[in-house]
Image (spheres, grey):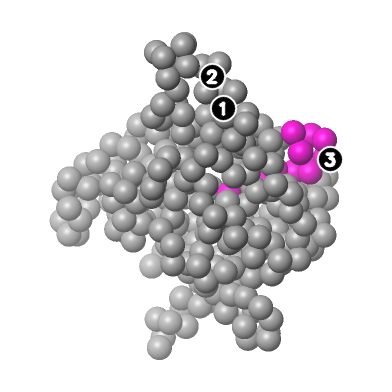
Amino acid sequence: MMMEEEGVVENSERYRLCVNALKGFMDDAGFSDVVIGLSGGMDSSLVAVMCADALGADRVHGVLMPGPYSTDHSVDDALDLARNLGIRTRTVSIAEPYRAFEAALAEACGGKLSGLAAENTQARCRMVCLMALSNAYGWMLVNTGNKSEAMMGYSTLYGDTAGAFAPIGGLYKTDVFAVARWRNRQAEIAGEVPPIPEHVFVKPPSAELSPDQEDEKSMGIDYPTLDRLLKAHVDRGLDAAALVSEGFDAADVERVLRTVRATAFKRALEPPCPDATFYE
């Protein structure tokens, strides 16, 4: 029971830290409204809730940007979230601009735009759409990245790394889920509709940039294992030998630490975020 209470307190503190940091950043920068890409996934869902709590629903502008591999359920989840929060949305498909890039780049890319180049081009199409709305209306683009993916470089430079501020950039993926569950529970206690649809909690996380893509399969490690390893290495400072002595698989340790080192250049280009580190 004590462990459960401590977890509730930590999730409450993390949530309020992220919301207050977002509001403070916007006040300092002089923004009143935000624009956010709504993918139907957990990261963008939680950030949207934080934005609505920090600013009010009328100052949060959600954008759905379905692409070639977007699923119907992701669109439905994003719309359900927006309805629960009372935020306005618009849909800007990236299918046509992506096809234009695909055609323009095919010859230069060896005859076909494929693989990582194709996936990242889709993410950058979304960034162009969001920044156009940011510039047109003076809205601040909010980043939806988390710490797990930042440490692994699992993001697209000039794509989903874009944004002025990353409210959950200091939260590991498993903590994102825990904080989201806490926020939904607060709504239930208050007699309100939980803002984040239940389906968002149970479906496999995916960037939906290729057929049947799932984040954990792409990274080769599940989020609970990855986060325990990253917390031990990044937050507690354990090196490879110490991590193996604590029971982590040697191959996982070698691969994750190598990836963390190799993607430092990408983290240098990530937007600022609150430090939400809590030692366990």
Q: Amino acid at mark 3?
A: Tyr
Q: Position of residue 135 (x, y in %)?
A: 79, 34
Q: Is residue 266 magenta?
A: no
Q: Residues within 10 Å of mark 3 (few under 14, many from 20)?
A: few
Q: Residue at x 44, y 62 (%)?
A: 203
Q: Residue at x 41, y 58 (%)?
A: 204
Single out the mark in the foreground, 2 or 3.
2
The residue to which callout 2 is attached is 103
Q: Position of residue 101 (x, y in %)?
A: 57, 22
Vertical order, 6 against 80 (above or below): below
Left-right relation of 47 to 239: right
Vertical order, 204 against 188 (above or below): above
Numbered tag placed on residue 77 in the rendering: none
Residue numbers of the magenta segment: 132-144
Vertical order, 15 against 211 (above or below): below
The residue to which callout 3 is attached is 137
Q: Circle 2 — which element?
A: helix
Q: Circle 1 — which element?
A: helix
Q: Position of residue 84 (x, y in %)?
A: 69, 69
The residue to which callout 1 is attached is 99
Q: Do callouts 2 and 1 mark residues in contact (Cβ within 8 Å)?
A: yes
